[in-house]
Amino acid sequence: MIGTPGAPVEAPREVTVAHAPRRAGSTPWRLLLRRPTFIAGAVILLFWITCALFGTAIAPHSPFAQQLLATNMRPSAAHWFGTDQLGRDVFSRVLVGSRSILEIAALATVLGTVLGTALGLVMGYLGGVVDLLVSRIVEAVLAVPLIILALLFVTALGSSVLVITLVVGFIFTPLIARTVRSAVLVESQLDYLSSARLLGENSARVMFVEILPNVMPAILVEFTVRLGYAIFTVVALSFLGLGIQPPTPDWGADITANYGVLPAGYWWETIFPALAIMSLIIGVNLVTDSIEQVLAS
Amino acid sequence: MATYLLRRLGLAVITLWLLSMIVFFAGQVLPGDPGRAILGPLAAQSSVRVLDQQLGVDRPLVTQYWSWVSGLVHGNMGQSYEFRSPVEPFIHAALLNSVKLAALAFIVVVPLGILGGVIAALNVGRPIDRVISITGLSATTVSEVVSGVIIIVIFGVELKWFPVSASAGTGASDLSQLDHLILPAIPLVLVLFGYIARMARAGTIEALESDYARTATLKGLKRSVVIRRHILRNSLLPTITVIATQTGYLFGGLVIVETLFNYQGIGKLIYTAASGKDFPMLEAGVLTIGIVYMVATLIADVLYTLLNPRLRLGSTG
C-alpha cells in the first residue's frame, strides 16, 4: 500500500467493500465447519438430540420393561449395557434418558438468555438504579454455588420439570445479564450509537434494533457456555433426587437409583449413564470452544 | 489500603444482606405454610395453626425476616424443624468435616495445578502444553457425579485400594480418616486442577513476555534464576484470586461428593435438609456457604494487595 497512491489503490479497496457484507454472513459458518473440534462436538450433540426425539423408537427394548428373572445382568449381546436391579435394559434407558436432560437444560438456557439479554441491554444502555441493583444481586447469586441455590429454590417450590426449568432459567438471568451488560458498555462508546441517538430514535429502538445485533456474538457464546452449566446443574439436581422421578429414564436419577449396588460390583448400571453425561458435556464444550475461537479470530 | 479494605468489607456486607433476603424469600416465603408442610395434608387446620404459631411463621413477613436476621447477627441461625433444636451445632460439626475434605483436596490440587500451569507455560505450543491444557479443561467440565462414580468403580470396587464410604466411623484414627477421604477428594481435585492450571499458565506466559523478564535474561541471569526470582512471583498473583473463588464453588461439588460417598459434611447436611424440607437448616447451610465464599474472596483480595508491589506503592505513595 505504501508508495502507490492514486487509482491502483482505489480499485481493490472498492472490491473489498463490495464483498464485506456477504463475507460477514457466510464465513463464520465455513470457519466453524472447518474445525474438527466443532464437527466432533456437533456429531455428539446431534446423536443425543436424535435419541431425545426418537429414543423410544431406536431403543432395542422398552426402557420400562422389567425382567425380574434377569436382574443385574452383565453387559452381553442381548443387553449391550447389561440390566439394572429391576432387569430393565440399561442401554435403552441411556438412549431414552437423554430426553429429559436436553429438554430441561435447553429450555432453561433459552429462558435465561432471553430474560438476561433484555435485562443486560437495559442495564448497559440505561444504567442507573436497575444497573446498580442487578449488579449487586449478581454478586449475591455468585456467592453461592449454582447447584445449592437451585436446590434451595426447587425444594421450596416442589420438584417438577417446570419448576426446575424456571429456577435454573431465573438463576441464569442475572448472570447472563452481566455478560450482555459489559458487551453493551463496549458498544455504547461507538459512533453509530450517538448518531442513532442524534437521529432521535427512542431508547427501546436503539437497544433492540441498533445494539442487539451487534452484541449477538457475545450472547451466542454465553448461551453455549450456560448450556453446559445447565446440563451440569440439572444432572446434579436429578442425582440429588430433585429432578425427573423414577421410573422415567433419566441419567442422574438412574445413577442415584443404582449406585447403592456399586460395591456389589454391578458397575454397568451407573457407569453408562455417567459416561452419557460426560459425552454430552464434552460435546457442548467442544462446540462452545469452537464458536469462541472462531469469533475471537 | 485501609480505605480499600473498608470498601471491600462494606460491599461484602451488602452482598451478604442481599443473599440473606434471597435465602429468606426461598426458604420462608415460597414454600407457603410450614405447619401444613410438616404435619401433612390430613392434619386438622387447628393443629396446623398452633404449630405455625409455635414456629412463629404466622407473623407478618417483615417481622419474621427481622427476627431471623437479628438472630443471625447474634449467632442464632434458627431452630431445625426436624430436630426441634438449634441448627448451629449441626452446621458447626458438618462444616468442620467439609473443611477437612476440602483442605485435603486443596493440599493436593494447589501445588499440582500451579506446577502443571507453569510447565505448560514454559512449553507453550509444544505437545506437553496441549496435553496439560486439554486434560485440565476436560477434567474441569466433567460433573462430580460422573467422576465420582468412575472413581468408585475403578479404585473402590475393582482395585479395592480405598474404602468406598467416606465416614471412617466414630473413634477412628486420623490416618484411617485420611484413608477414607482420599477417594472423595479426587473429584474435587479434578474439577479444580483445570482452573488453577489455566490461571497459572496465563500468568506465567504474561510474565515471560514482560520487559523485566527480558531484561533479566539479557543481563545474563540463568533461566532457572529468571523463572524462580522474576517469573513465578508475578505469575502466581492471579492464581491466588482463582483459588479463593474456587473455594466457594468447591462447596457446590461437596453436595454431590458428600452424598455420593456418604460423608457428614455441610453438603450432605444441605441435601438431607432439602429432602426433609427442614428449611431453617437449609437456609443456615446455604448462608454458611455464602459466608465462607465471602471470607475466602476477602482474604484473597487482601493477599493480592499485600503481595502485589504495584498496589502497595500506589496506596502509600
Image: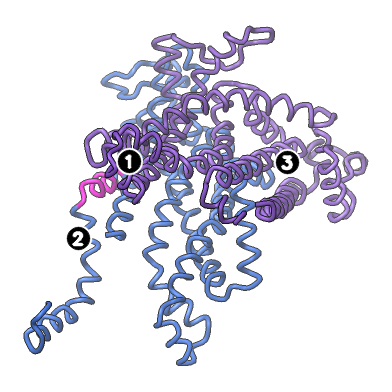
Chain colours: A blue, B purple
Q: Is residue A95 visible?
A: no
Q: Quadrant of the C terminus of chain A?
A: bottom left
Residue A69: image quadrant is top left
Which element type, helix, strand or loop, lies under badge 3?
helix
Q: Which residue is mark 2?
A: A30
C-alpha span from label 2 to label 3: 50 Å
What residue appears at the point 15 percent right and 81 percent down from the top-left corner?
A: A13
Q: Which labelled disc corresponds to residue B283?
A: 3
Residue B156 versus residue A184: which sits nearer the camera?
A184
Q: Amino acid at mark 2?
A: Arg
Q: Position of residue A228 (x, y in %)?
A: 42, 46
Q: Position of residue B304 (x, y in %)?
A: 55, 45
Q: Which residue is mark 1?
A: A57
Magenta-highlighted residues: A35-44
Q: Is residue A36 above or below residue A175?
A: above
Q: Chain of mark 3?
A: B
Q: Is residue B53 magenta?
A: no
Image side of residue A209 versus residue B313, left or right: left
Q: Position of residue B184 (x, y in %)?
A: 52, 22
- Characterize the local packing of mark 1: few (<14), some (14-19) or many (20 or more) Cα atoms within 10 angstroms: few
Q: Quadrant of the N terminus of chain A?
A: bottom left
Which element type, helix, strand or loop, lies under badge 1?
helix
Q: Are marks 1 and 3 in contact (CB under 8 Å)?
A: no
How many dots with numbers? 3
Q: Is residue A209 above or below residue A268?
A: below
Q: Chain of mark 1?
A: A
Q: Amino acid at mark 1?
A: Ala
